[in-house]
Structure formats: C-alpha cells, structure tokens
Image (spheres, rainbow, N blue to C red):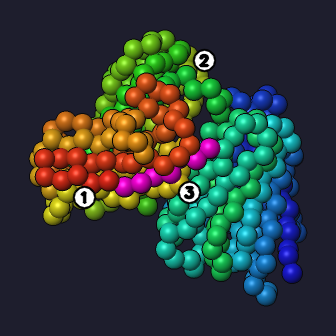
C-alpha cells in the first residue's frame, strides 16, 4: 500500500523575511530548527512542503527530522526517508532558483546508486547523479524558476536524506571553463580558469571530508590571489595550494564567486584523494561520475611518472570540443570537472562525448553522456 507523508520545511534563521519573498538572492535552507508534530514538521514560515511516497516495510519506513551529528558532511540536522521510499518531492510556494542541494545516502544500501532530480517549472533539465553508499555530497542543480522537484532513487530497502539547499541567482557572473585539482609537494593544488567575469568581487574556496562539514579555507578577503577582476572579457587563470591536508583522505572542494553586491554563486565542485605516499603503479583514467550528467561530471586520472599529459573532450566525430588539462605533470593523482561547455564557453549539444587521456605511453578513452 502506498504511503504519502507531508512535512513543512522550516526556514533557517539566515534567511531574512525579504529573502523569503525573493529567494533569487543567495540564501540557504536548512533543517536546524525543524520540529516534528505528528507526521508533519511545522514552522512559522510556510515556504516548502516535502512529500514522500513509497511502500515502507511493514512497521517501518516514513520520513522524519533526524540529527545526523554532522556525519557524511551534513550540517547535523537532516530530513530523512527510509526503507522502500521511492520518491521525495519538494514543492515551493513561489518559483525559486536553486543552486545546490546536499544529499546524504542513508542506510543499509550498497554499491553505486542512481538518483534522478526532476524539476517542474522554468526551462530546466533533469539531473542524473551516481551516489556511493555511505557518503554525502553536494549535488549541483543550477535551476531557475522551479516550483517543485522530485528525487527518485532506484534502490529498495534503503534510505536517503537531504541537508542544506542553496538558493541562488542562476545568471552566473563568472564564465568558468575549468576547475582542476592535483597533488603537488604534499599539498593539493587547485586551479580554475574563467573566460569572462561580470562584477566579480572574488572567489571563495570551501573544503569538506568524511570527518567535517564544509568550511572556508580561502577567500578573496584573506588571499589576494582570489580577488576578482570586476568585469573582464579575457581569460584568467587562478590557483590556490591547500597545504593543510593529511594522507589517505578524500577531500571535496567547492568553488564559489561573490558579486559586487555580495551575492554568492556556487560555480563547481570536485573531489580528490590525498594518497601521494602510495604512488600510482600505472597511468589510468578513472570512470567519470556522474554519467550520464548535467550540469557537470567529475574526472580523475593517475600518472605513474612525470610526463606530458592531456585530458580533452571529443565529440563522436573526433572533433576536439574542450581541453581540460595539458602540459608536463608530476606523477600523482589528479581530479577535474567538465561542465558541458566547449573551449569558447558555449554549451555543447546533448549527446555522447569521449574523454581522452593522452601521454607518450598511453591513449585511454571513455564515453560520457551529456543530457538536457
């Protein structure tokens, strides 16, 4: 028998009353002041209704507010649905622009799971995301004019949950063409390139791992190299070295930009494991994830020795679409992302593309599917 439970999502104190009327300014929605009342969660601001539909195991299942204790990168309090839950739907009282949502894989499931985020309203694309059990991650949505969206997870006898939602102005002031990470001299080096900037005050870099939530590690206020150029139409390369890392730890990084009027926009994210003490035995291109993807996919590769290496994207006709990285690189582990744009910053057509790793010793290719 299908069971539907509704809760009212609470508005975190960081959102002002004016932001309630216009969530197209940077704001966050968390669960920190949520309170269960029967099968609903109520708060003074009636902004979002969350509906869960599924077939819970007899005597089990449903939805609730729970304290995750900061596990899996959550802020602490999350909304969670368990067991044979099939769908969870977020419905908004007004159309909103959504930048990201933090997803938390729940309970008892194993392997890599496919989550599908389906929006209603505006001109937006479905987002497909592969999720490894037992982890948490930021899912980039970049939707505009959304009235609701549904998340479907194709896995039974398990649970899933959600933490912070970031609302944003989806008109990006920065045209980001690459965001890469690599290990260098016992540190993780981050590099990104912009093709153009509009009223850009600067950048913020955040980091999280399995033991901590997102924290700011550098910003335009503390590091002059992260200051923006205001408005510019030429290419610019930025870099930052994260020296406060430990071995055998997986780190996730999130890059945001800040406009002149203080609006924060999440641009991209990636992950990289710090394990330089165990150098790669071979040069290898890892599987991109998510795949299929929209708006971006993450790519990891390993070099067993210092060499010239190029990572590029080709269409099925063999034409180079985008150069993601190129040059002499030290032996080690590398991570980067592709946002479905070509070398000129234009969005590519939906379809099949080839990620190509080329060195003097090897040529490796894998297929990725860009969807809209």
Quarter of the image for residue 228 reads: top left
Local crowd at mark 1 within 10 Å, few (<14), some, or many (≥20)? Answer: some
Q: Secondary structure at mark 3?
A: strand
For the residue pair 30 and 83, the one nearer the viewer reads as: 83
Name the mark on residue 129.
3
Above or below 242: residue 85: below
**Stretch of the chain drawn in magenta:** 366-372
Name the mark on residue 261.
2
Q: CA distance from mark 3 to mark 2?
A: 32 Å
Quarter of the image for residue 104 reads: bottom right
Q: Secondary structure at mark 1?
A: strand
Residue 370: say if magenta. Answer: yes
Q: Residue furthest front?
A: 317
User: Which mark is in front, 1 or 2?
Assistant: 1
The residue beneath circle 1 is 284
For the residue pair 19 and 107, the one nearer the viewer reads as: 107
């Amino acid at each position: 028998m299908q069971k539907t439970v509704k809760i009212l999502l609470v508005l975190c104190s960081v959102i002002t009353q004016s932001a309630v009327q216009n969530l197209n300014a940077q704001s966050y929605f968390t669960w920190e002041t949520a309170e269960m009342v029967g099968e609903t969660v109520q708060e003074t601001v009636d902004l979002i209704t969350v509906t869960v539909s599924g077939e819970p195991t007899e005597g089990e299942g449903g939805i609730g507010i729970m304290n995750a204790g900061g596990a899996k990168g959550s802020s602490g309090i999350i909304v969670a649905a368990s067991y044979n839950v099939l769908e969870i739907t977020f419905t908004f009282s007004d159309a909103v622009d959504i930048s990201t949502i933090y997803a938390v894989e729940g309970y008892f499931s194993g392997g890599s799971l496919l989550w599908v985020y389906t929006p209603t309203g505006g001109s937006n694309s479905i987002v497909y995301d592969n999720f490894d059990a037992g982890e948490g991650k930021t899912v980039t949505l970049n939707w505009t004019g959304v009235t609701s969206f549904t998340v479907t997870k194709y896995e039974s006898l398990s649970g899933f949950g959600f933490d912070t939602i970031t609302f944003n102005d989806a008109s990006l002031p920065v045209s980001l063409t690459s965001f890469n990470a690599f290990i260098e001299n016992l540190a993780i080096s981050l590099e990104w390139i912009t093709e153009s900037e509009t009223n850009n005050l600067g950048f913020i870099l955040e980091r999280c791992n399995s033991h901590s939530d997102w924290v700011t590690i550098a910003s335009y206020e503390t590091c002059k190299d992260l200051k923006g150029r205001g408005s510019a139409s030429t290419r610019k390369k930025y870099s930052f070295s994260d020296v406060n890392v430990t071995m055998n730890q997986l780190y996730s990084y999130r890059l945001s930009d800040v406009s002149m009027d203080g609006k924060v926009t999440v641009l991209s994210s990636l992950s990289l494991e710090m394990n330089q003490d165990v150098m790669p035995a071979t040069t290898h291109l890892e599987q991109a994830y998510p795949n299929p993807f929209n708006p971006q996919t993450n790519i990891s590769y390993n070099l067993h020795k210092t060499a010239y290496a190029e990572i590029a994207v080709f269409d099925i006709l063999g034409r180079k679409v985008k150069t993601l990285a190129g040059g002499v690189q030290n032996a080690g582990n590398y991570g980067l992302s592709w946002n479905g744009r070509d070398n000129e910053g234009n969005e590519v057509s939906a379809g099949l593309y080839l990620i190509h790793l080329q060195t003097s010793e090897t040529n490796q290719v894998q297929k990725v599917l860009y969807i809209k």
